[in-house]
Amino acid sequence: MSDTIKYLLDEQDLPKSWYNINADLPVPLDPVLHPGTKEPITPDDLAPIFPRAVIEQEMSAEREIEIPGPVRDVLRQWRPSPLFRARRLERALGTPARIYYKYEGVSPAGSHKPNTAIPQAFYNKEEGVKRITTETGAGQWGSSLALAGNFFGLEIIVFMVKVSYFQKPYRRAFMEAFGAQCIPSPSDQTASGRAILAEHPDSNGSLGIAISEAVEMAVQRDDTKYALGSVLNHVLLHQTVTGQESMKQLEMAGDWPDLVIGCTGGGSNFAGLAFPFLGKQLREGGNIQFIAVEPSACPTLTKGKFAYDFGDTAHLTPLVKMYTLGSSFMPPGFHAGGLRYHGMAPQISHLTKHGYIAPRAYSQLDTFAAGVRFAKAEGIIPAPEANHAVCAALEEAEKCRESGEAKTILFNLCGHGHFDMPAYMDFMAGKLQELTYDESEIAMALSGLPCGFD
Ligand SMILES: *Cc1c(COP(=O)(O)O)cnc(C)c1O
């Protein structure tokens, strides 16, 4: 059998609609609540921060939502993305398992994030918006929205988590090349940023703080809206192109997964790959196991609480029922910046709570060791976030070697690591640290959860 096995689809196989798992949930999601009234939010409540079309998608229960022509036209530049069979990796591991990975590093920003940045920019443009504010962790989302804003003629302002701003200067340059403005967060440009700086002048920042800053700036002007790169229903929806394409590609291979694996920061790349398979399983039955992988230093699904919480630190967002470590939790500054979030997508949280998704957590050193083994076999250096999915895939393939079972493993290689080489340099020099969170900090953050509803 040949070493490089690649399943490619034609341009006309780019999905024409997104798949909405809300149509197939056995138990509906808990409502999103207004932070003031504690009543379910209405579309009007969200209108200051999101365009109408996005709000409709956020609340929709339609199974299929059409992808607009101009959006497909941009996505076509790199989609459908390739699905690879990891033959050299299988051989290196001596496993009977068949390992496939969907490669999202082929997008211009190097990750899955443009899959939602493009439609979000399109809908804002359609509704006359001039500026979009956002936050970014590792810089992947800021880069993707900068790219999308450039295509659709929108001004983009990105609050970048401070620790990543200094760890990843090339991400900032990437955003600026597309005309976006990139501000390290916490900043002195917003009241929420100034409040954090007054208390913690050396704050590393967090996604929760950066979200507060971006939302605060968006609500101040009518021509400005806000965009989120993960967590929300519409974002997970936009990512389902990856799972739908993978279904067709595995059909080409004459195969079907036993395991579907993705890393989870806010949950969007995992959902994008998993939901089309999971939806089919909910409708028709099946035995696929879905594994969500997170860092053990920010263990939202494995150690968090399923409760109503705010999406941000300053408590400007609505309350959503999700797994959370508490909105004041400050994860340590590990390198998988995209996975440093205190909460998790409500859809992922709900499906985990009801037993449809199995979460697990790995340490930073284990994930980098897995990433380097993968790179040596397959020639692609994964993003530090993606290393978490790689680590689970390797572990499962090794279990197959022990048991002799020939399982089919599918995982999302959601981005490449070309902007993350300083982290790899630390790893190879033996300088990468095993970071752990402080138990008492999580306990404190969780004790501050908004109370009165369950
Ligand atoms: C942003 C990002 C993540 C985390 O976000 P999800 O919404 O959980 O996918 C993971 N991997 C990469 C490469 C990212 O850019």
Image (tube, rainbow, N blue to C red):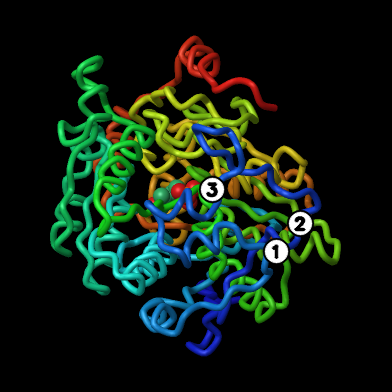
Q: Are marks 2 and 1 in contact (CB under 8 Å)?
A: yes
Callout 2: 10 Å neighbours few (<14), some, many (20+)?
some
Decide which of tag 2 and tag 1 comes sooner along the chain: 1
Q: Residue at x 14, y 62 (%)?
A: 179
Q: Residues within 10 Å of mark 3 (few under 14, many from 20)?
A: many
Which one is in front, 284 or 190?
190
Q: Which residue is mark 1?
A: 277
Q: Relative to 54, is 423 on the left or the right?
A: left
| In front of the other: 154 or 185 | 154
Query: Is label 1 in a helix, a strand or a loop?
Result: helix
SS at mark 2 in the image: loop
In the shown orientation, is residue 24 left or right of residue 6? right
Viewer-side residue, 1 vs 223: 223
Name the residue carrying label 2. Answer: 288
> Assess mark 3: CB under 8 A from ligand 1?
yes
* Image location (x, y in percent) of residue 112: 43, 61
Residue under numbered circle 3: 267
Q: Amino acid at mark 2?
A: Ile
> Considering the numbered disc 3 on the image, is that residue within a helix, a strand or a loop?
loop
Q: Nearer the viewer, mark 2 or mark 3?
A: 3
User: How far apart are the alpha carbons under marks 3 and 1?
Assistant: 15 Å
- Image quadrant where one finds the N terminus: bottom right
The C terminus, quarter of image:
top right
Identified at 49% across, 44% down, the residue is 266
Residue type, numbered disc 1: Phe
